[in-house]
Amino acid sequence: MSSSERGYDAVVFDLLTALLDSWSLWNTVAGSADAGLRWRRRYLELTYQAGAYQPYEELVGEAARSTGLGMACAEKLVARWNELAPWPEAPQVVRELARRVPLGVATNCSQRLGLAAAARCGTGFAAVATAESVGYYKPRPEPYRAVLSALACNPARTLFVAGSAADVPGAKSVGMPVFWHNRMGLKPLDGAVPDYVAGSLLPLLDLVS
């Protein structure tokens, strides 16, 4: 199938929520779903406010400290990083899509942890842009642009698969259409509207032919 006949020439994924169930690991380390959610929300606030890259592990630790969990919680999360598991259908979807188009990842973490997390998906990616490698956290435009540049793809023909609400306006801001894998039933951010939304990754197999 030629490029002009395909709907998209490449697919870029958010990693830690779109492809991996990081929620479960954070909740387990925090001791409960409520504590994990508070911790994660605070961490997200810190990354959105960060501007230039600040070490991922430090932001996770500050979020744990400020929500009453203590710095040891952040250390435990990093120590158990290889327990991150893909969503059940993710390996199948990623393997099949990789046969059709180049795949990339834009993720908000350190280079070391980002590459380790990407390896948990079972399939290699043509490009992985981490907040550390780019120098900024999403939803700033730099991480999205970095992976687009690495893939040498037109934003309008590159489907972004968001996991978090902030990735929807973030990817839209650089011209990418967005599929929101809203597994957790999150509310939209800033009124941003994705092109597609689903609670599973399986619809991607029909969208990316």
Image (cartoon, grey):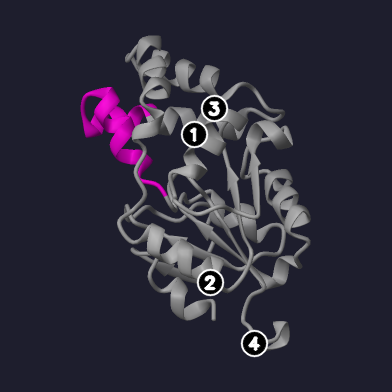
Q: Secondary structure at mark 1?
A: helix
CB under 8 Å between discs 1 and 3: yes
Q: Amino acid at mark 1?
A: Leu
Q: Which residue is mark 3?
A: 46
Residue 108 higher or lower than 146, as above or below: above
Residues at marks 4 and 3, CA–CA distance in whole angstroms: 44 Å
Q: Secondary structure at mark 2?
A: loop
Q: Earlier in the sequence, mark 2 or mark 1?
A: 1
Q: Which residue is mark 1?
A: 44
Residues at marks 3 and 2, CA–CA distance in whole angstroms: 28 Å
Q: Which residue is mark 4?
A: 1
The magenta segment = 20-39
Q: Residues within 10 Å of mark 3 (few under 14, many from 20)?
A: some
Pick whichever, 112 or 51, lies toward us.
Answer: 112
Q: Position of residue 76 (x, y in %)?
A: 36, 18
Q: Which of the 4 image quarters holds residue 99? A: bottom right
Q: Which residue is mark 2?
A: 195
